[in-house]
Amino acid sequence: MKYDHIIVGAGSAGNILASRLSEDPNRSVLLLEAGADFPDLQQLPGELKYLYGDRPDVYESEHLWNYEARATDEALPILIPRGKVIGGSSAVNGAQFLRGVREDYDLWAEWGNDEWSFEKILPYFKKNESDRDFQDEYHGTDGPIHCRRFTPDEWGPQQQAFYDACIDAGFPDCPDHNRPDSTGVGPLTFNIVDRVRWNTALGYLDPARHRMNLTIKPNCLVHGVIFDGNRATGLLLVSGGERFTVYGEEVILSAGAIGTPHILGLSGVGPGDQLAQLGISVVQDLPGLGRNLRDHPSIDINWSSKQVFPLKEERVAAGAITLRYTASGSPYKNDMIIYMNNRLAEAPGRSLDESKDAGISVYLCMYLALSSGELRIQSTDPSQPPSLDYNYLHDPLDRSRYREGIRLCADLFKHAAFNDLVEDRLAPSDDILASDEALDLWVKQQVRTAHHICGTAKMGPSSDPLAVVDQYGKVYGIEGLRVVDASIMPHCVRANLNATVMAMAEGVADFIKQGH
Ligand SMILES: Cc1cc2nc3c(=O)[nH]c(=O)nc-3n(C[C@H](O)[C@H](O)[C@H](O)COP(=O)(O)OP(=O)(O)OC[C@H]3O[C@@H](n4cnc5c(N)ncnc54)[C@H](O)[C@@H]3O)c2cc1C
């Protein structure tokens, strides 16, 4: 059997493509996913289902890929979790549902991707969402992903204190972070229904499962693309310990910003010299594959608190109140973000111990970092992950913006609203805070991922030496092969990525239907 479209990866992008393309009964769609399938909400394990309140730790889930990466020379290797399940990373993420700023998408257009200006992507943001709080030209009300903001009566005392401290420090009130020109402090949008993380399997795939032209195959690890000359004709995969080949008119890779470049490299599409050294025969030399690795670096700053905030009593998700601001002298609007957490920060590999972890934390992230890293294929064995070098804080502006951000957090917590809540800042100490050099070192040791890896198969015009795909997601030099996921973002937008990945998948589904 030959399918019209074979999609690899049932994550944020893959499920949307599978759902939208199979709306046309004349198209046959095969969706392949390495992870498990939980075909309805009742079967979904607790850690994948619930975002806050009493629930198992998502970082201990068996439905994850756990990669390791270099953050900086001064840091120990950091853990990079990604979703490995039908739902992908949208099933394990923090459900913070934020759009980039207008300038992000207009930059993409300026760089030669005129289909992705803010004006052109906006209809796809709207198509994707049902916003419970706002109905205007910027918001959708009948899309598959439900979203809302926490109201002041739901905020905990620490969120209220943070909001008050930010307002008194002169930051504007921001009732809706998803308005394109917004900035300041206010409730972040979350894609949740009650406590349930509304992932793309729940929103898009489950309502399409009955279609006879849509075949969903979980537990299938794709090893590579099959070519006839410069045309992709199918895929090689392993399912239940057996090897299979499947054929399609078009192969769409939506395996995420690590999985997709991994599959491309193993298939001979990527930096020719790097692949040839491994003995991989080069089908298409694309030097940009794996370069331009982008992310948002993040740091937790912790205070001991005068009270415990137990998980089971959490009434809001972590980061329910958020400050977006522009660093002093920075040309990049809203390049910094501070999330007020409920309690000491959770981190991959670190589960919370309620008896010991009484504390409050903020999560300080740089949402437009200048430093970029690299992903490299390091083995022909598909079970061996690529190497990941995030190369955080290489650029001096990244370091100075972090110094300012940490000092800002320390000042905000001196506000009287925190007097009854907070005891001491646990780290960095006052001595470290006072010295630029010591603070840079502390940040380089502590920095970790905000989980927003992207850009590893960048889209751009053919004149861009790092571009791997054109603005329709089509891989340069290869027929019948497209990439649609976070890999193709030219830079890391000033937002958590899920909303943008979903809007891009909606957009490319339309491009395909229109014959691009
Ligand atoms: C812990 C965590 C927290 C996050 N928090 C937020 C947040 O709060 N808000 C936000 O907006 N974003 C968040 N993100 C980021 C966001 O979820 C991702 O950027 C987005 O889901 C990426 O979508 P994608 O389609 O590119 O990839 P994914 O959703 O990761 O999908 C890729 C799929 O491909 C499958 N796959 C990979 N390789 C193969 C293979 N060889 N064969 C078959 N299948 C394969 C994977 O198993 C996966 O299901 C978070 C991410 C993580 C991991």
Image (tube, rainbow, N blue to C red):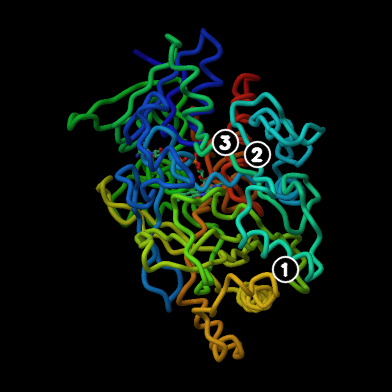
- Above or below, comparing residue 293 to residue 113 in the picture: below
Q: Which of pointers 3 and 1 indicates the residue nearer the eye? A: 1
SS under mark 1: helix
Q: Are marks 2 and 1 in contact (CB under 8 Å)?
A: no
For disc 1, does the CB lie below 8 Å from ligand 1? Answer: no
Q: Calculate the distance from the C-alpha at mark 3 to the C-alpha at mark 1.
A: 44 Å
Q: Amino acid at mark 1?
A: Ala
- Nearer-N-terminus badge (3/2): 2
Q: Quadrant of the N terminus?
A: top left
Q: Position of residue 492 (x, y in %)?
A: 61, 54
Mark 2 or mark 1, which is nearer to you? Answer: 1
Q: Tell me how far mark 3 sits from mark 2, CA to CA.
A: 31 Å
Q: Observer-nearest residue: 421 or 44? A: 421
- The residue at which mark 1 appears reads as 165
Circle 2 residue: 148
Q: CA distance from mark 2 to mark 1?
A: 24 Å
Q: Is any atom of residue 491 visible in this view?
A: no
SS of the residue under disc 3: loop
**Can you identify the residue that label 3 sits on?**
473
What residue do we see at 53% from left, 85% from top? 429
- Looking at the image, residue 48 sits to the left or right of residue 505; the answer is left
x and y percentages locating residue 467 in the rendered image: 58, 48
Which numbered tag is attached to residue 52?
Answer: none
Q: Amino acid at mark 2?
A: Arg
**Where, quadrant-wise, is the C terminus in this rendering?**
top right
